[in-house]
Every structure is written in structure tokens, then in C-alpha cells.
Image: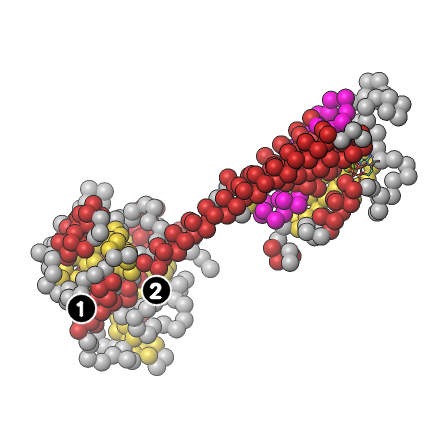
Amino acid sequence: MSTLRDLAEEHTQLRPADIDHLHRIAGDWQLLSDLSFADLLLWVPVDGDGTFLCVAQVRPTTAPTAYLDDQVGRIVGGPEVAHLEVAYRQGRIWREGDPVWYGDVPARHEAIPVRLRTAHGESGEVVAVVGRDTNLSTARTPSQLELNYLTTADDLAQMTADGTFPPPRHPGETTSAPRVGDGLVRLDANGKVTYASPNAQSAYRRLGYASHLVGEDLAKLHRRLASDPLEGTDAANGVLAALRGEAPPRREIDARGATMLTRSLPLMPAGVPIGALVLVRDITEVRRRDRALITKDATIREIHHRVKNNLQTVAALLRLQARRVSMPEARVALEESVRRVASIALVHETLSMSSDEAVEFDGIVDRVASAATEVAATEVSVGMRRKGSFGVLPAEIATSLVMVLNELLLNAVEHGFPPAGEDGVAGPEGAAPPQVVVTAHRFRKQLHVSVADNGRGLPAEFDAERGGRLGLQIVRALVTGELRGSIELRPGAAGGTEAVLVVPLARGERG
Ligand SMILES: Nc1ncnc2c1ncn2[C@@H]1O[C@H](COP(=O)(O)OP(=O)(O)OP(=O)(O)O)[C@@H](O)[C@H]1O
Ligand SMILES: [Mg+2]
């Protein structure tokens, strides 16, 4: 489906600033739709031919829709859009007339010109028209709530035509704004409440205000209710700013363990400040969940930290034992265990410092690789290089993968480049310097890894399927088990040995 911007750019001569304004309308017009109990369609004139194109649509959450079908992308001309033409040409709100019928749904049409103020705040050109279409099939004598909503809707419609609604956006507002249904309060020019919806009344009750809101000075009330005096002043100032015709950022009020989000909007049809609209939402639960998440996050990090500490203790114990034993084979075996444990500790250390259950893996590989060259029992100096990136990996993959890579790297250094004289094979004169290259890339939700050395190659008797002692057994168990991937050891293209590893990354493929 095309976006508002695509449609406008393809069919009209609207300037970028106009289109930005249309985006602002579409970002804030649920409010107008809900207060109007009406569908809103955003129409832009198509170049010169008297037709209009619908670039956006919103349905009321407070009433039945007049349009079961999506209208976006429709281009309409002739009598059906005559009212849009009037609003567009004359720059005034058009209403009345007999109901029109969509199938068997009677509807009332209105047209609100959308004006874009100039940079100097003067009223500028009409760039589009909002069609306000009410489904009349359920219309009846309106309740007090409905009358209040409709009056406010008319003020906002006039402000749309004036170019003062929607107000400018405040960057960084992430929590979704309170909606009409969450709670609505209307103030007169003196800041006294003239109407409060039942939900608004309930939201204030949770903050500890039990009486009826009508007649209250809302700014003073905010100051009184807030547990934190600074927050109370801030919330009061929000209301006062709206009364002066400004659109302040959203504010929160905490009282008695409850939290309320408020959004204050000026009401100034035809440029005359007549009061303000305050939308409120009880966000106590949202904030409670936020806090719980923060502590859960901190707990998980703390656990990783402790696991890391414990593993380091285990490694230290093994190292101590390795020093005590006199049998060389036993000592080597213990030292290798130290390295295995230490490489897992590395993953937990990284996880204890990150904010989620995923790790930036390249740093870990580089550390394991340089450890492998340092500790391997060899006199040959082996170069290590990483090509490509592992990217961010989920913790459960990272823990197994670091073990696998540790084994492969140690093998490459130990067996690829044995100390000269161990079995009498010295590197040929003038050969390339000993080097191990780790390559990683992602392809089709799989991670492809290769560990290649330019050493002396696999022994002739090596069984690619089953060969190997503990090291390769660990590798095969982890790759086919935890990682659900595959591993192959083969002679490298330019000599040496290459281990090729494929690990699926998509969650669905992992049990
Ligand atoms: N990159 C390599 N180059 C040459 N030979 C290798 C290479 N990788 C593995 N091998 C051969 O495969 C054998 C099995 O490796 P494996 O890691 O299972 O055992 P290991 O390294 O001998 O002992 P450990 O259990 O301590 O790892 C090695 O002994 C070696 O002969
Ligand atoms: Mg090994």
C-alpha cells in the first residue's frame, strides 16, 4: 500500500513542508475523529483537473464507521466532491445538506480546509481538505458527553482550518498519547473545569481526588495532588501554557502510588483563546511494568556477573591443580580445561555488561583468538586474523559457539604448527608465515564461519566423520546439539586445514 507521502508526491504538486503538515494531521487526528464520532478522510486536490485524492483515513473509536472499505488511494471528481471543492476554494468549513448514502448507511458530510501557517505564524494557504463523515444510522439525541465532545470537535475543526491544530510535535515522546476514551477534561478560559468525562473523573480519583471535577481550577488541583512539589508545579504549568495558547509537552503526575499522563491542548478557534483540553490517562500499570523490567534486566546482568565469577574461580582451582600435578599429560589436560572454562566465562562477562540477552560477538572471538595464540604450546608465532563480522548473537548461541571456536582455534595453532622437531617436520623455507584466519558472514538467516590455517594439514589417517579426541568431540556435540548446525573439517584450498561451520540463526528453527 502506498504511503501518504508516496501518494502526495505522485499525484500532486504539494511542497515537502505541506506534506509534513499532512503527516502531522494524520498523526493527531484520531482525537478529532473520536470527538466528532466521525470518519475523517484527508483529501488533496489532484493537479488542475478538479478531482481529489484520498491520502489518509481514520475511523472513530467512539462510534460506528461510515466506510467499511478503505478509501485511501481513491481519486474522485464531480458532485461527490463538490463540498471538498467549496472548502478548498473558499477556505471555510462546509457543512449541512441532506444525508448522503453509502450503500444502506446514511452519512453526513462535512469538509474542513487544512491550512498551513507560514513560518511567521500568519495564516497561509489551504493545502488539503479533511472530510468529516458521520454515520447517522445510530444517531439519536446526544448525551451530555456527546454534546461536549462535539463542541470540542468543532473547536478543533476550526483550528485545523486556522492552521493552529495540530500543534507542533515534541520530539522524544514515546508513550502513546492519551486518547479521548482514556479521559477528557475541558477547561474554560480561566482554567476552571467545565466538563470531565467519567474516565477522567476515575483517573483523578486514583490520584486521591474524590470530589467532582467541574468547577475546579485544574492547574491548582495538579499542584495540590502531585506527591512531588516540582512535578506538581510542572503539571500545573502545562495546563497554564495551554490556556495561553501554547501546546506544552506531555506531563506525568504521581500521587498515592498512581501515575497519570496528561496532555494539554489549547482551544483557540479563530485565534481566540477560549480554554484548554486536557487528555489524561492512568498509566500506573505501564510504569509499574517499566520498573519491573528494569529490575529484571539488572537481575539478569547480575546473574551473568556471578556465573562469570564462579567460572573464573573454577578456572583458578584447575590452574592450581595443574601446577601441583607432576605428570605432564595430566598437567596439559588440566591447563586445557582452564582455557575451556575461561572462554565460557568470557561470554558471561560480556552478557553481564550488555542490556539484553544478546552479545556483540566479534570482540569475544578476537579475545579467544588471541588467547589461543598465547597459550598454545608452540614456539611458532602464529598470526590471527578475523574477516567479516559475527554481529550480535543471542546468548544461547554465543555460549556454545565460543566453546567450538576455542577448540578449533587451539587445534589450528597446536596441530597446524607443531613446535619444530616435535615430529621432525619443520616448515619449508620461504613458506607463507603461519596464520589462522577466522571468517564469518551471515547468509539467509545462517551464520557461516570458517577457521582456516595454512599449517601442515590433517594427518593422513584422520577420519573426517568420527576422528578426534575430546576437543573435536566437544565441537561435534555442541554443533549438532545446542547449535543445530553442521561442521566439516577438510584440507584448505591453499594447503593447511579448514573447519567450516554453519549455524542457523532464525528462532523458528531453534527448538
Ligand atoms: N587444524 C588442524 N591441523 C592439523 N591437524 C588437526 C587440526 N585440527 C585437528 N587436527 C587433528 O585432529 C586430531 C583431533 O583433534 P582434537 O581436538 O579432537 O584432539 P586434540 O587436539 O588432539 O586433543 P584435545 O582433546 O585436547 O583437543 C588432532 O590430534 C590432530 O591430529
Ligand atoms: Mg584439540
338 to 257, vertically: above or below? above
Q: Which label lies toward us, 1 or 2?
A: 1
Residue at 50 percent across and 39 percent down: it is 353
Residue 30, label in figure = none
Is 378 contained in the magenta span?
yes
Residue type at mark 1: give it.
Asn
Q: Is residue 429 left or right of residue 144?
A: right
**Could you tell me if residue 474 is visible in this image?**
yes
Q: Magenta segment range?
A: 375-401
Is 231 contained in the magenta span?
no
Residue at 27 percent across and 70 percent down: it is 37
Q: CA distance from mark 1 to mark 2?
A: 21 Å
Residue at 36 percent across and 72 percent down: it is 67
Residue that label 2 marks: 58
Residue at 66 percent across and 45 percent down: it is 400
Label 2 environment density (alpha carbons within 10 Å; few <14, some 14–19, many ≥20): many
Residue 92 coordinates in the image, percent (x, y): 19, 60
Q: Secondary structure at mark 1?
A: helix
Residue 156 coordinates in the image, percent (x, y): 21, 60
Residue that label 1 marks: 148
